[in-house]
Amino acid sequence: MATVTASPEAESQSETPKARRRFVWPRGSRLGRLIIVLNVLALAIVVVGALVLNELRSGLIAARIDSLSTQGELIANVIDQTATVGEPEPALDPYVASQLLQVLFIPRNQRARLFDAHGKALADSFVVADRVDWKVLPPARKPGDKDAPPHLTPAAQARAEKARQALADEIAQAMKGRPVAGTRIAEDGERVVSVSIPIQHVRAVLGVLTLEAGDVDEIISAERKALLPFIVVAMVAIVLSSVLLHRLIAVPVLRLARAADHVRLQGARAISLPDLSERRDELGDLSRSLEDMTHSLSERMDAIERFAADVAHEIKNPLTSIRSAIETLDLVTDPAARARLLAILQNDVNRLDRLVTDISNASRLDAELSREHPKAIDLSKLLAEVASLYEAQLRPGPAPGSVRVRFGAEIPRPILVLARETPIGQVFRNLIDNARSFSQDDGEVRVFVIRPRGKSTVAVIVDDDGPGIPAENLETIFERFYTSRPKGRAFGGNSGLGLSIARQIVEAHGGQIHAENRKDEAGAVIGARFVVELPEVRE
């Protein structure tokens, strides 16, 4: 059986420019959605909490300013109506103003101070209410200590002077007849909400009433405490998401990497993968793909070992015959016997050359299948071209090589299959060569295409009029290096790889190939038939 393998040229594929990358929501990725949702949720908790508390802080300060302004305007009106003396130039009576501040209710967390038109302090609610501020005293200084107490340090004195200047500026602005409100640092270093209300008699500014609320730091502290639950929840969400991602991604990937390292370092043929088959995400798909890949590689390595053993066995036979003929050639003097030995040598050399060629073709088959990409092929046109090549090489008369090849299709329209043109053409050439080798000189090999009923495939049938195939060998003929010749046929004319290569190519295209015997009405074998089924591409 002669085989022909044409090496297809690698198709040049021009690299297309990379499309602009855009963010796409991972619709088919559960793990991707989980990662995005968990991290966005943790971030959203912190952002929402911060926004809510910022609004609360601003609202509390604004509410305190409104409250102090209302209270200050009321006190300023009372002082104007009660403590104003002098005509025609009005002025404030310090004694009456102090009594009013003592009578009026001033909460303990607030401080009221009254200044005259020149900015001189007239009354202080802390003084008239006999309020004494107390603080924990610092540790007693030891003899020889040169450090001053905190309240006497230059930095503390500078802060106090800055606070007094800020109060003076606020009073000066209020003297212009407009209320002043805001936050500032008091003499003791605390942040206070301050409102300065001018005391006006008609249009004359008699003084300024300043109300301070020193609970701003308490408000800020309360806000920070209120923010803590949001921070804790966010941190818990981030930690949980990190632990979850670690267990779902990092640990399985690490186990997969260790399994791969085990194969690389110890030369193991099979890989023991972690059981992730139950997962319905990318890692589950990766685990199943790696398992299938390693199983396929293991089978491929077993096939390579069997192929190497078969090759060694097949090559050994002609080499043994050649060595025996060479050793005998020097001992034979009869010209006829020497001619027979030379003929044996020539036959074995041709057989060895045929074996090496077919073995090379078989070993390159996987690479050729991976280089050429499948495309829609008109099967009728391809078979017609193959048949025309054999007709062009036809020899006249009943001689070797005079077997005709006739092609006929029962389907008039084009028959499209998704295949690689060169390898699939090799399948039909191998089948036709095999059929011709078993046919009588001046015989005929018939090739035709049909569409089996109830199937989405097309079938290519190759018939010959040879002796047929023994029933027990209908499957074994597709094994590598298997040859079975009827009596009278020359031994060594075939390598036994043609049908094996044909089956490998057909199965790589998702098809099937099988052999059967043709019989007449009486049940006698009248030839062999090979059937190749391939998926059809519907237009």
Image (spheres, helix red, strand yellow):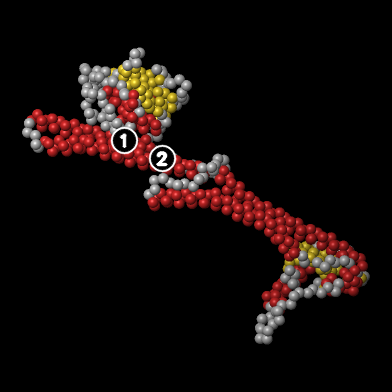
Give neighbour class at mark 2: few <14, some 14-19, many 20+ (Cα, 10 Å): few
Where residue 28 appears, x then y in whole percent?
Answer: 55, 40
Q: Secondary structure at mark 1?
A: helix
Q: Do we see residue 205 in this rendering? A: no
Residue shown at 33% from the left, 26% from the top? 472
Tag 2: residue type? Ser
Viewed as shown, does residue 258 lie left or right of 503? Answer: right
Residue 408 lies, with reference to residue 198, above or below; the image says: above
- Closer to the observer: label 1 or label 2? 2
The spot of residue 322 in percent (x, y) is 17, 36
Q: Give the image location of residue 198, x and y in percent.
A: 83, 65
Which mark, residue 296? 2
As measured in the structure, the alpha-carbon distance from the residue carrying label 1 to the one carrying label 2 is 18 Å
Q: Residue at x 35, y 28 (%)?
A: 475
Q: Quick check: marks 1 and 2 in contact, CB under 8 Å?
A: no
Query: Foreground: 290 or 56?
Result: 290
Q: Nearer the viewer, residue 8 or 511?
A: 511
| Label 2 secondary element | helix
Q: Residue furthest left?
A: 333
The N terminus: image quadrant: top left
